[in-house]
Image: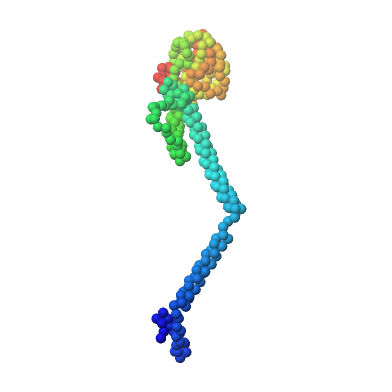
Amino acid sequence: MKSNDDMNVIFVGKRHGRSRAIALNAGIVAALVFTVLALLLAAGWAGYQVAVAKAEAKKPTETELVSTWQDKLQEQRAEVTRVRENVQQQVDALTLRLGDIQGRLLRLDALGQRFVESGLVASDEFNFDQPAAVGGPEDGMGGESYSAPELTDMIEQLERTLDDREKQLRLLDKVASRNKLEDELYLQGRPITWGWLSSPYGYRTDPFTGKRRWHAGVDLAGKEGSDIITVGAGVVTFAGDRFGYGNLVEVDHGDGLVTRYAHAKTIKVEIGDVVQKGQVVALMGSTGRSTGPHVHFEVIRNGKSENPEKYIQRASR
């Protein structure tokens, strides 16, 4: 009889289907199990050792670590340099834009000063030599610095405002210049600073012959050596002695208008000079066909004389 602790292992052959039974007791089975477990543990330990060996093989040396960190530091330095260059480029660009804005503001100040000097703007209301006065109470907060994008936006807004103001002021300057030019060319006023009308325009009794003769201008008497001034801007087309007129200044005002200032003691201008309205062109005298210190004043339009009195009495524009 076989013991209950025995175990039969049956082997079946491939040929003829024959089988063979081997009896195993508990000791043999335990030995086999222990052997299998030992083999598994040995295989696991071997795998662990292989893994540790590979990890040790991949672990960088101290030199490799230093080299790696040096490479990273070099990359960071290069990145910092790129950022610094980029920031410097932005600063340079903003500096150029600020310089352009400063130049444009100086031109606007100069234009504003011209308006003040011309009387178009009250000088006591605008002082272009000083910055605009501003102020206000603090809110107790420390405030925040502007960021680069905010500063860029502010500069762009300022540039747009400057563009708009420049256009408006250029247009105003053109209008003012045109008005000033028209005022300068507008014949008006007396050719003297002091004196009186001594002979009118038209037919009169000749002071030398007593006969009735045509007088093509008006005579304004005054003090010898007093100023003779133009009644409008123009170009001097004659400055010298002319028969009957004595020392004569002739000014062409354009549009067919010419004025003459005769009998001067001294001439202050030359042919080709550009004269302004109210400018002194001669000093009163009694040269030529004259009985005493006065200025013979003529106005000629398109070659024909006109009564100067209507220009003397003309209202200012």
Q: The N terminus is located in which quarter?
A: bottom left
Can you give x and y, in whole percent of width and height, for residue 189 in the image?
Answer: 44, 17
Can you give x and y, in whole percent of width and height, for residue 276 in the image?
Answer: 50, 22
Can you give x and y, in whole percent of width and height, for residue 8 in the image?
Answer: 43, 83
Count how many numbered circles sit on residues in the image. Answer: 0
Q: Residue at x 47, y 19 (%)?
A: 231
Q: Residue furthest bottom?
A: 16
Can you give x and y, in whole percent of width and height, for residue 210 in the image?
Answer: 48, 9
Q: Is residue 78 above or below residue 123?
A: below
Q: Is residue 220 above or below residue 109?
A: above
Front residue of this view, candidates 77 and 259: 77
Is residue 274 in view from this perspective?
yes
Front residue of this view, candidates 184 and 306: 184
Q: Kindly indicate the quadrant of the structure image that contains residue 50.
A: bottom right
Front residue of this view, candidates 39 and 120: 39
Q: Residue at x 48, y 24 (%)?
A: 129
Q: Residue at x 58, y 53 (%)?
A: 65
Front residue of this view, candidates 77 and 99: 77
Q: Is residue 145 left or right of residue 51?
A: left
Q: How is the image coloured?
A: rainbow
Q: Is residue 172 above or below residue 202?
A: below
Q: Is residue 125 left or right of residue 281?
A: left
Q: Residue at x 60, y 53 (%)?
A: 62
Q: The C terminus is located in which quarter?
A: top left
